[in-house]
Image: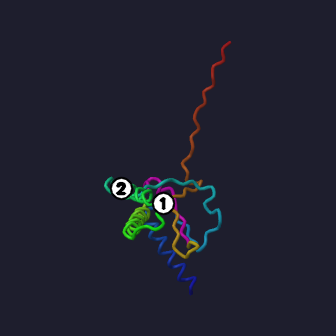
Amino acid sequence: MLDRLTADKLKSAAEEIAAEGWKWIEVAVSLPYGVAYGCGSFWARRRADEDERTAMEALQAERDKLENEYETAEELPEEIDRRLGEIETALENFEKRPLDYDPVEVARAGAFVSIAADGALSVDRGYVRPVDEPPVTPRARTLPIARL
């Protein structure tokens, strides 16, 4: 029964991910070591507009300033400790934002869906299998002309 519930949860997650347009989805409770061996991958970008980026840079600068200012203090004042916690939470939330993938890349790539060691859902997107790589066209080589 537990196996069936787990499989149903993974299947549901895989259907949501497939709706993003990935070419393939591989689902397993535990993926074997090296499952992505030979696959290519591509980068995605975090969703954020210019104002959000500016706000995050300001938070990072504030955090750095506070850490430098209080680096020799044995104990942080309560308000500084609280503020550093707020900043870390905001920065972590920024890092948890969804990623944007190029739709052209998504159409030829896939994702692995499994369960992480801590029991959470693990989704690794953006892998391109060798058969899905675009063909490489050889460039014509030009040979130097021999001078006699």
Q: Can residue 47 be seen in the rendering of this structure?
A: no
Tell me the CA gap for discs 2 and 1: 23 Å
Q: Quadrant of residue 36?
A: bottom right
Q: Which residue is mark 2?
A: 58
> Residue farthest to the top?
148
Amino acid type assigned to the residue bearing label 1 in the image: Thr
Q: Is residue 110 magenta?
A: yes
Q: Element type at marker 2?
A: helix
At a point 52% along the width and 61% down the height, the residue shown is 110
Quarter of the image with the C terminus is: top right
Q: Quadrant of residue 96?
A: bottom left
| Image spot of residue 138 (x, y percent) | 59, 38
The mark nearer the N terminus, 2 or 1, is: 2
Q: Is residue 51 left or right of residue 107?
A: left
Query: Magenta stretch?
Result: 100-114
Tell me: residue 148, above or below residue 127.
Answer: above
| Image spot of residue 62 (x, y percent) | 38, 57
Tell me: residue 67, above or below residue 81.
Answer: above
| Image spot of residue 125 (x, y percent) | 51, 61
Q: Can residue 52 be seen in the rendering of this structure?
A: yes
Q: Which residue is mark 1?
A: 72
Q: Is residue 70 left or right of residue 37?
A: left
Q: Nearer the viewer, mark 2 or mark 1?
A: 1
